[in-house]
């Protein structure tokens, strides 16, 4: 099966042009000078040139090494016994980057740090609060790990009142052992349910990939479960293998199927849906928020 999957070639709809603009170079320099990590570069996002050229980036806090070994991900794993201390100045440097880039919508994500007692929750909070102190009209989206289900850590992030709380489910439950061996599907679902029950004013978001071997029926069931858990928004994108060391692509999903998933998600009741081959959870996230202004007005 591996050889057959290796033979898969990207179809026409996945041949995206890479842009090398002056703005992209400027953003790269700002991030380099401030010694900041982005999921754009470390996760090898195919939208990097587009976002950098639009002076947007998704900040990745807590270092550039992860304590988990998800087989779909390009981020380097923290080796056993390897210590990676927290960067106390990171929140202020991110705030400086927000100023220099002129961002009005900021997305903050992280590697998973199971080696830290709170999973890095306080670093999320410190980063959000630093941006709010600079300008409390800037909208902030957090994309967090599961914090091993620790409610105190979830509360720490939720209590700093980001505008959007995102936690990606990543794939259908059947594929977790192959794709996310150190994660737990029910733990993630329970995290979403806890947030909706205890922080109803938070806009709740999740996302997942397709092309990993899931069926249409599994995708529709997953959408129902995310909606039942309380998600207001969902993103669906094509899995693209970062390297030969990662899980092989099982299918390149046709754009018509993405449109089908989008229509089904809207029928199920999601207030915002982004579904397409190059959709990622933080890609054009500001547009999703803008489209949900009516929702924000209802709960504020």
Image: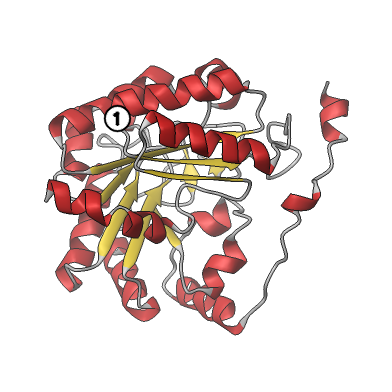
Left or right, residue 147 beside residue 168: left
The colour scheme used here is secondary structure
Residue appearing at x 31%, y 70% in the figure? 104
| Mark 1, other Cα within 10 Å: few <14 / some 14–19 / many ≥20 | many
Relative to 292, does residue 167 appear above or below in the rendering? above
- Along the viewing direction, whichever of 56 and 255 lies nearer the viewer: 255
Provide the secondary structure element on which disc 1 rests.
helix
Q: Which residue is mark 1?
A: 192
Residue appearing at x 73%, y 51% in the figure? 14
Instruction: Locate residue 148: give its quadrant.
Output: top left
- Along the viewing direction, whichever of 80 and 116 lies nearer the viewer: 116
Residue lying farthest to the bottom in this orientation? 22
Relative to 216, does residue 81 appear above or below in the rendering? below
Q: Residue 206 placed where, x, y %?
A: 40, 38
Residue appearing at x 17%, y 28% in the figure? 197
- Along the viewing direction, whichever of 207 and 274 lies nearer the viewer: 274
Q: Is residue 62 visible?
A: no
Q: Residue 224 placed where, x, y %?
A: 41, 23
Residue appearing at x 67%, y 43% in the figure? 255
Q: Residue 79 placed where, x, y %?
A: 53, 36
Q: Quadrant of the N terminus?
A: top right
Q: Is residue 279 visible?
A: yes
Left or right, residue 180 beside residue 155: right
Q: Residue 296 placed where, x, y %?
A: 20, 52
């Amino acid at each position: 099966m591996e050889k057959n999957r290796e033979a898969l070639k990207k179809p026409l709809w996945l041949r995206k042009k890479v842009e090398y603009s002056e703005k992209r170079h400027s953003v790269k320099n700002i991030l380099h000078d401030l010694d900041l990590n982005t999921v754009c570069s470390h996760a090898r996002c195919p939208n990097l040139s587009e976002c950098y050229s639009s002076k947007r980036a998704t900040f990745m806090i807590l270092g550039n090494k992860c304590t988990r070994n998800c087989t779909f991900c390009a981020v380097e794993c923290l080796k056993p016994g390897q210590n990676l201390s927290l960067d106390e100045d990171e929140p202020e440097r991110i705030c400086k980057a927000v100023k220099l880039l002129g961002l009005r919508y900021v997305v903050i994500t992280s590697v998973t740090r199971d080696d830290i007692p709170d999973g890095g929750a306080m670093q999320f909070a410190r980063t959000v609060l630093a941006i709010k102190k600079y300008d409390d009209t800037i909208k902030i989206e957090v994309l967090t790990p599961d914090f091993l289900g620790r409610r105190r850590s979830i509360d720490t992030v939720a209590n700093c009142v980001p505008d959007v709380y995102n936690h990606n489910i990543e794939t259908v439950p059947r594929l977790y052992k192959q794709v996310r061996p150190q994660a737990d599907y029910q733990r993630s679902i329970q995290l979403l349910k806890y947030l909706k029950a205890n922080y109803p004013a938070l806009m709740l978001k999740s996302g997942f990939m397709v092309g990993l071997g899931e069926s249409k029926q599994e995708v529709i069931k997953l959408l129902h479960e995310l909606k039942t858990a309380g998600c207001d928004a969902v993103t669906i994108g094509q899995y693209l293998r970062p390297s030969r060391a990662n899980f092989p692509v099982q299918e390149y999903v046709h754009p018509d199927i993405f449109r089908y998933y989008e229509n089904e998600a809207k029928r199920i009741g999601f207030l915002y849906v982004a579904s397409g081959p190059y959709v990622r959870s933080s890609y054009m996230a500001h547009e999703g928020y803008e489209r949900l202004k009516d929702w924000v007005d209802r709960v504020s």
